[in-house]
Amino acid sequence: MTTPTFQINGRTVDLSDSHPTESLLRWLKARHLTGTKEGCGDGDCGACTVVVLDRDAEGRARYVSVNACLLPMGAMVGREVLTVEALATAGELHPVQQAMVDAGGSQCGYCTPGFVMSLFSAWYADLPLSDHDIEGNLCRCTGYRSIRTASDQLNSLPRGEDRFRARLREGMPRLPAAELHGYFSPLVIDDALVLKQQYASAQWIAGATDLGVLLGRGKGTDSTYIALDRIAEMQRIERQDAYIMIGAGVTLARMEHELSDELPVLCDVMPWFAAKQVRQRATLGGNIGSASPIGDLLPLLLALDAEIVLRSLQGERLVPIAEYFTGYRQTRCRDDELIAAVLVPRDAPRQMRFYKIAKRQTDDISIVAACFALRLDAQARIRSARLAFGGVAATPIRLPVVEAAMLDRELSDQLVEEIARRIAASLSPLDDHRASADYRLTLCGNLWRRYVDDLRSAEVSV
């Protein structure tokens, strides 16, 4: 783009004087659009929820609720954004706003704009509104009863034609390549890799749900960034003969929506992963690329025997995820490479479960995450086993020695207890402010026991 611009509430704004790592939330506040509130600044509370015009997998325009506190202005070039100030028309409240008024859905009012924007995006999805649509919004006053009442009332109203629905029918072209003061947004992988050659210290950035927290606190604001969220090739999901290829730019929300039938274990993972607004920006590649030992998807990918597709200007190479992590925040990805996709075998075990223990149920960092996958024959003998953990070592890990000890044995009570002991003997977790080493070891054994209980109670057929 010649001049970097974006649209805010239907008005085109020149971004030439904007800092690329300033959050959209701070940008709005500086321009007196104060309806969007600042709560946690981490993407946990939803007070700063705005709506971005985006495209679904079929290319249709849709409204997506996201956290303004995590969106850097460099990512906004060419985009369209709506805040709560845009909803009323000629002094008449939008039906979502009116329902909140009628149901008494606001007490102190601080969280209300965020709830309104989440319900607004759901209103135009033409699906029944539910708690799922406000799961990323926190209210400390009302107890949610009146907010749920507002949602129920909206389900009984006709969703007629208005200017917002008309905008969706106009469609949305693909975003252009863009650059804002060292924040580059290329459209193809090779262009991103060429930029990386030119700016060796540049950081990759996609959904910005991780780096956005740091940028919002003034860290890394002088760096160069190469954004990957406009690269169509990295947003594909392709079903091949033996694998599902998931582009590194595919969001967690898309994985949940499009792959849960083939990978039912995603239904175990996603509700506990993060707020809905975060899942609509966070990407598969970002969760892997951060190389965090507590990345929630990583034990799952280990249990699935996934392979990482790394791309450089010289070509592609595959690295099994079991070999990918080499140390704390260290991987086999070279400086001249990026994560392009992930290959997941299509014959994933049906006897697979994911568990996450944290201090609170949702929107929290794991104390321990675990994913278990067994293949059993008709006599309940174990033909293959995968035991994967996060939060108990410097990297997410599998326990191949323990897995081997299970093969060709019946899943008896005695074996369950033996494996629980072997798990504890194989792990050496650290003590930290989240949990002690002993507590983590106990959790790992108990999660294994729970997994077996869940299999038995479900009477899984092979």
Image (cartoon, rainbow, N blue to C red):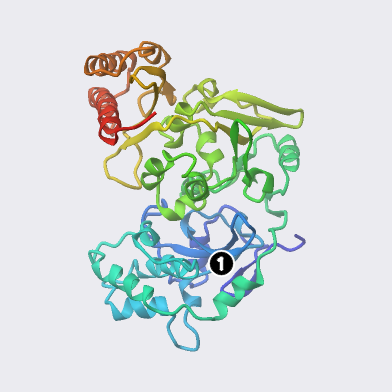
Q: Is residue 451 above or below residue 69?
A: above
* Helix, strand or loop status at disc 1: strand
Residue sitting at x 33%, y 35%: 355
Could you say where residue 245 lies in the image, as x and y percent from the top left?
61, 37
Which image quadrant for residue 431?
Answer: top left
Residue 343 in which image quadrant: top right
Q: What is the three-letter code of the residue carrying label 1? A: Val
- Position of 357 compared to 374: left or right? left
Q: Visible in this render: residue 121? A: yes
Q: Is residue 317 above or below residue 163?
A: above
Is residue 19 shown to the viewer in this render?
Answer: no
Q: Is residue 436 left or right of residue 95?
A: left
In front: 412, or 49? 412
Is residue 333 or residue 157 the one in the foreground?
157
Judging by the rendered image, the residue that carries numbered circle 1 is 81
Q: Is residue 140 above or below residue 370?
A: below
Quarter of the rendering occupied by the C terminus: top left
**Image quadrant in which you'd find residue 270:** top left
